[in-house]
Image: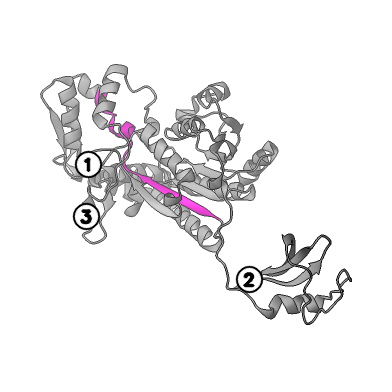
Amino acid sequence: MSLCYSSTFITLPSSKNQTFSINFSSHSSHFINLFKVNSAPYSPLSSFSKKPNEPTKYTKQKLNLFASISPSQPVETTPLTFRTKNPKDVNVLVVGSTGYIGKFVVKELIKRGFNVTAIAREKSGTKGSNDKETTLAELRGANVCFSDVTNLDTFDESLKNLGVSFDVVVSCLASRNGGVKDSWKIDYEATKNSLLAGRKLGASHFVLLSAICVQKPLLEFQRAKLKLEDELVKEAEKDDRFSYSIVRPTAFFKSLGGQVDLVKDGKPYVMFGDGKLCACKPISEQDLASFIVDCVMSDDKINKILPIGGPGKALTPLEQGEILFKLLGKEPKFLKVPIGIMDFAIGVLDSLVKVFPSLEDAAEYGKIGRYYAAESMLILDPDTGEYSDEMTPSYGNDTLEDFFARVLREGMAGQELGEQTIF
């Protein structure tokens, strides 16, 4: 508990009928503010009856006495934050800046006028295919810093050498393959490094790109993300000058585009079960980036977990396939795969891991595929235990049909799944 005092007990004489008033204030410790006021001629206090212009001697005891005579009620004050500034005066640090969503977040921040520092690896992109020059071109308009966010000492030193402070950290980090070790190294450890390093340089707000599937954590990357989410919440609870926004999007467009070329070539659309085991409200990279940047300055997104999907109703794999065939002008042709096949494969891999630990990631990949084949990327209603289309917020304008149409015209360039491909 802290005490707050605000009083004007002592009036000091000055020339030209002006006086100085001493204001005693205390918040954790006492301090004195002097400010000039217009006043009537000198009027002595009972304890300080002095002639005009005669110096008054003060002791520490007297000052403390006056400061404690009549304490005011504590006043809630809101410290000035970066949200009172113009975007051009707000410094934003982005980690995961070369990822699928990160690139669009950097572009959106620059478009809105923020000062952006983007952290990148020297070899970035799918399987490290991009060199420094390519990265600099992709992130034009940002101050690009090449560093290793997985090594806190190295990362700290890189940021220190920039010689700037930060207001906000935006993390778009995500493990490249969802493997056990990689999930904890990136989704938790590297993301926490960005929190620690950013805080050292003044950052008071952290925007985390998480995932809606952490509601039902059965996979390692989900557990890693949840642990980091929990630490953000704890940081805000212990320091009221710090805040967070946790963004949990549904499926990305690219994760649903892997079969476009196959169907275009006349092959069937593959789905598990009857194609209705799960549903999602997919969101484009541009719309998601826009929502993430909204979280930088919006007061209504402070200290909140924010699930978000794209526009329109939730779509099942069956409905996604029907949209694709409609755009192609072809009769729908589906290949329905029993979900039990995946359960059998996962069971075999889990058994083999006990003998061959090196197969741990292979077993995890199987579980990831099984999860996305059967679990909806929607809000899980705590009352019913069912996924809810109606409870899942929508944002943006880009639809999956628009995305499919563009891919049919232009191909999947820029939408590569890399190591996360299932079909």
Task: Determine if the magenta segment contains residue 53.
Answer: no
Label 3 belongs to which residue? 386
Q: Residue at x 26, y 60 (%)?
A: 382
Q: Which residue bears the numbered disc 1? A: 314
Q: Nearer the viewer, mark 1 or mark 2?
A: 2
Query: What is the x, y in percent for residue 59?
Result: 84, 76
Query: Which amino acid type is marked by label 3?
Result: Glu
Q: Secondary structure at mark 3?
A: loop
Question: Which badge, 2 or 3, is on the more N-terminal residue?
Answer: 2
- In this rendering, position of residue 245 left or right of residue 250: right
Instruction: Calculate the distance from the C-alpha at mark 3 to the C-alpha at mark 1.
Output: 14 Å
Q: Return the x and y of residue 60 as percentages of the image width and height.
A: 81, 75
Amino acid at the residue labelled 2:
Cys
Name the residue nearer the viewer: 87 or 148.
87
Count of residue discs: 3
Left or right for 347, reference 197:
left
Instruction: Say whether marks 2 and 3 touch (CB < 8 Å).
Output: no
Quadrant housing residue 119: top right
Contact (Cβ within 8 Å) of mark 3 with mark 1: no
Magenta segment boundaries in residue numbering: 242-260
Which residue is at a point 20% across and 33% down the rendered structure image?
A: 320
Which comes before the other along the chain, label 3 or label 1? 1
Kindly report the distance in space between the C-alpha atoms of the residues bearing marks 1 and 2.
Answer: 53 Å
Which of the two labelled residues, at mark 1 and mark 2, occupies the earlier sequence position? 2
Is 350 located above or below residue 144 in the figure?
below
Residue corresponding to mark 2: 4
